Amino acid sequence: MDVRRPTRAANEGTRKSMRSNKGRDTRPELAIRRRVHAAGLRYRVSARPLPGFRRTADLVFTRLRVAVFVDGCFWHGCPEHHTVAATNAAYWAEKVRANRARDKETTERLLDEGWRVVRIWEHEDPDAAAERVIAEVRSAREKDEKDT
């Protein structure tokens, strides 16, 4: 199916809404970052875990090789909260399908390269999500200390 990207938004309200979507520093991402930082962990923000691999993770613990992604429910096709677009439905369905395929490929590539990957949905409780990140980083740190 040939799904072409619309050249203009369906209306001015849609255009304004789409322009306001941020690629980083979203509310859920900031909430998780605050909690992880308060736990004493330091990380890089919106960084590429692998050089030459054009994918960025929301939080990257470079030395410990932990990559954290905070995925939006609409953009990444959350099984609980994803809604079907009313306008340009075929385009958006393909966009979300491609995003999910890219997310899967990214996770597999990072795992193959020895990284730990944490994927968090934007609707998750920030405290619980931050605890998952903290636990993964601490586990990676313990393994690193045993190996050295």
Image: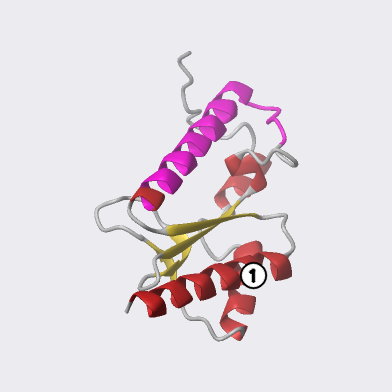
Q: Residue at x 63, y 66 (%)?
A: 132
Q: Quadrant of residue 91?
A: top right
Q: Residue at x 62, y 50 (%)?
A: 72
Residue 39: x percent and y percent? 60, 83
Q: Which quadrant holds residue 85?
A: top right
Would residue 101 be counted in the magenta stretch?
yes
Quadrant containing the C terminus is: bottom left
- Comparing 102 with 145, the one in front is 145
Q: Nearer the viewer, residue 12 or 97?
A: 97
Give coordinates of residue 146: x percent, y percent.
40, 77
Nearer the observer, 134 or 79: 134
Q: Which amino acid type corresponds to the residue marked 1 in the rendered image?
A: Ala
Task: Check the image and tell me how it is coloured.
Answer: secondary structure
Whether 96 is among the magenta residues is: yes
**Residue numbers of the magenta segment:** 83-110
Along the horizontal axis of the image, is 3 left or right of 132? Answer: left
Residue 115's spot in the image, x, y percent? 40, 59
Q: Secondary structure at mark 1?
A: helix
* Residue ID for mark 1: 130
8 vs 113, left or right, is right
Magenta portion: prevailing SS class: helix
Taking the spot 24% from the left edge, 53% from the top edge, the residue there is 52
**How many labels sit on residues?**
1
Q: Residue furthest top?
A: 1
